[in-house]
Amino acid sequence: SDTPHWLFGDQLGPHFVDPARGGPRRDAPLVMIESRSVFRRRRFHRAKAHLVLSAMRHRAAELGDRVRYVKADTYRQGLREAVGDARVTVHHPTSHAARAFVGALPSVRVLPARGFLVTHDEFRVWADERGTKRLRQEDFYRWVRQTHDVLMEGDRPAGGQWNLDHDNRRPPPRGAADLGVPAPYRPRESDIDAEVRSDLDRWARDGDVEFVGEDGPRGFPATRRAALAALRRFTEHRLATFGSYEDAVLSEDATMSHSLLSTSLNLGLLDPAECVERAEERWRSGAVPLNSAEGFVRQIAGWREFVWHVYWYFEEGYRASNALGHHKPLPDYFTQLSSDGTEANCLSHTLKQVGSTGWTHHIPRLMILGSFALQRGWEPRAVTDWFHRSFVDGYDWVMVPNVVGMSQYADGGRMTTKPYTSGGAYINRMSDLCAPCRYKPSVRVGDDACPFTAGYWTFLHRHRDRFAHNARMTRAVRGLDRLPDLDALLEQERGRGD
Ligand code: FAD
Ligand code: SF4
């Protein structure tokens, strides 16, 4: 039959319309719905709104007559306008809300999820077999490597070791302003972008939606073609140095050796399998070292995949977890992405970068923005919402586990073994941000006290009882007892405004 098939805005690649992989028939009409209410619900980064609309409209232009593209207020209205009460199919959407919505419509038949390596059923079997509520990425990743035959030599991991993280934690090269790798792929805008920009201007002018951040030249691919070019550029010119400097931060080199592929993966323009295969081929041909290929494969076949499954496995209530009882609101400068609200150089620098691009690599997200929120005791739900709105690659499924679980430890350790947070010494070792800062990373108390160093001890003190029982935290907690100035430090932190 000619049952129409509905494509969500993050289902834009060929693997979402592939009859050979359980998708719609080759001649099935397609439906796309641009819902304005999605943007009204949250104050999104403008670069994110731009990218999503641009990618959807580029896809519609490619599909031509085969697609009915409806601009509506809500999905429900759009669907009615596009197909009336007729039956439609759709691949499993990526958020609990959208999944519940399509599940409640009798006319919609939901097909399996696409865009991930492991199916829901396979993950459930894996997780249930562990018989535990504490799921670990490392175990999952090794299982994916084995079952998908990725970077394997027979039944052993390539190179004899599963984990090469110890090679992948190098501080940035001393005194260097940048890593010196070729620049990442940057797309060229089209007429569609000009249209999107003028629509967004109008929506904002009408007071219908509000945005934060700058909408500079679009920095990320909006088409399959551009996404493939970005993947090629990364694997051919930038992957070799990915591993060693994965965790390093340089103020003048925002992208370092990172792939910038998260938006293309999350929009469905790229399939993770092709990214993993390309990286493995580069290693097998001798073009890149194993620690780089493995580091990159781990991000995609390990972390990305794990986070997706944790989101579904832990179900809807997970987002409200708040094991540490943190309830403070985010300060205004943070929500407005203003770099003027703080004198901490690392924070203001990172906020500025988020404001102008909607993107930073992993370490500024985890060890600067997320760590600060955790130390200050901000409400995990509000922090999740902030990340979701402010980042070009933010979607519900990827933000909830990354923020609630990984960054805010609000799930009490269901997906990580210990909280990710540190004092200024770590930031000083891994970046060049401390030298120009008015604070000193080694100072805990007084005018020069680094807010991360003081914040770290305050956080440990606040949760001392809980962490004293965590084997990976006992040493840190014992460190509290050796601090001669703990009382003065706590007094100082009580007086802080942020
Ligand atoms: P690279 O460093 O080149 O890594 C390659 C790919 O691995 C990424 O493109 C991404 O697809 C995948 N990946 C790596 N780590 C993760 C992870 N933890 N979760 C999911 N995918 C991962 N990533 C998002 O795609 N969307 C988000 O909304 C998001 N929010 C995050 C929030 C916090 C607090 C933290 C700590 C991490 C978050 N991440 C998120 C993960 C990671 O920071 C980004 O995927 C990465 O920085 C994107 O840049 P890149 O494409 O250059 O990544
Ligand atoms: Fe950040 Fe502290 Fe370093 Fe300043 S000294 S940049 S506040 S870590």
Image: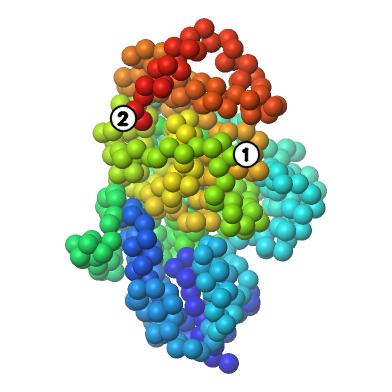
Q: Residues within 10 Å of mark 2 (few under 14, many from 20)?
A: some
Marks 2,1: beta carbons within 8 A: no
Nearer to us of marks 2 and 1 is 1
Determine the residue positioned at 36% across, 30% down.
498
Along the viewing direction, whichever of 268 and 312 lies nearer the viewer: 312
| Amino acid on which disc 2 is placed | Thr
User: Which type of secondary structure does the marked residue at label 1 adopt?
Assistant: loop
| Amino acid on which disc 1 is placed | Gly
**Measured from the top left, where is residue 14 in percent x and y?**
52, 71
Residue beneath label 1, please? 412
Colouring chosen for the image of the structure: rainbow
Residue 75 located left or right of residue 209: right
Along the viewing direction, whichever of 477 and 416 lies nearer the viewer: 477
Along the viewing direction, whichever of 316 and 166 lies nearer the viewer: 316
Residue beneath label 2, please? 342
Residue 399 located left or right of residue 468: left
User: Which type of secondary structure does the marked residue at label 2 adopt?
Assistant: loop
Q: Quadrant of residue 437?
A: top left
Determine the residue positioned at 40% across, 35% down.
180
Query: Measured along the vertical axis of the image, is residue 466 above or below residue 359?
Result: above
